[in-house]
Amino acid sequence: MIASFRGFCKRWRCLVVAVAAIMSSASCAPEIESYNDCVLQKLKPGLHELAVWIISRACREKFTLAAMSPQAVDNLSGALKIHESRATGNIYNGNADWTVKELTVVVGSKLLQLFNERQAILDHSYHINVDLPPLAEVSIAFRIDESSKAEESRGDWFIYNAEGLKD
């Protein structure tokens, strides 16, 4: 029984080493930009199911969105024009180590955040999917609802929260 356990451990160690080699290989392969790209590029026919599980988990961990710190959110800036029921503008990512994937924009005064008006923030917030690499700018556009139109005349807005991938 001990011999079979040792054999299992040797095979398992070999499998982990093989998976590590596959995951770290950066030969002439195209750049991996998403979970699906990672899985499709790293999984090869004939891999043991444990190797498939390890690769899938490593890809999932690499491409799981994380909440950006308040300091990182402060490094996001831009201009937004609000006209009728549409908001359009540009957002710049001043972070060198974050790729932004989701923004929460609040149409309303920054005072809402200062006074911790959580319900007002929720009522006037918009979640926007973006693909904003480090030190780059992207255009955004989204529809605003009737309750946010009162803020239109002032054009007040701010980025409340963001999620992304840390490089």
Image (cartoon, rainbow, N blue to C red):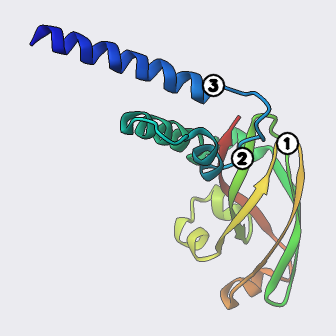
Q: Amino acid at mark 3?
A: Ser
Camera-side residue of 73 and 32: 32
Image side of residue 68 versus residue 99, left or right: left
Residue 46's x, y, as percent?
Answer: 46, 39
Q: Quadrant of the N terminus?
A: top left
Of labels 2 and 3, the one closer to you: 3
Which element is circle 3 on?
Answer: helix
Q: Residue at position x 80%, y 39% from top?
A: 95
Of labels 3 and 1, the one closer to you: 3
Which element is circle 1 on?
Answer: loop
Res 106 → quadrant: bottom right
Q: Amino acid at mark 2?
A: Glu
Residue 9 lies, with reference to residue 59, above or below; the image says above
Which element is circle 2 on?
Answer: loop
Picture disc at residue 24: 3
Residue 66's x, y, as percent?
Answer: 58, 45
Give the Cα separation between the discs numbered 3 and 1.
29 Å
Looking at marks 2 and 1 on the same chain, the residue that comes earlier in the sequence is marked by 2
Res 157 → quadrant: bottom right
Residue 165's x, y, as percent?
Answer: 66, 43
Of labels 2 and 1, the one closer to you: 2
Label 2: how many Cα within 10 Å (few below 14, some 14–19, many 20+) = few
Q: Residue at position x 65%, y 49% from top?
A: 37
Q: Quadrant of the C terminus?
A: top right
Residue corresponding to mark 1:
94
Give the Cα separation between the discs numbered 2 and 3.
15 Å
Residue 131's x, y, as percent?
Answer: 77, 56
Mark 2 touching mark 3, by CB under 8 A?
A: no
Image side of residue 28 versus residue 7, left or right: right
Picture disc at residue 33: 2
Looking at marks 3 and 1 on the same chain, the residue that comes earlier in the sequence is marked by 3
Label 1: how many Cα within 10 Å (few below 14, some 14–19, many 20+) = some
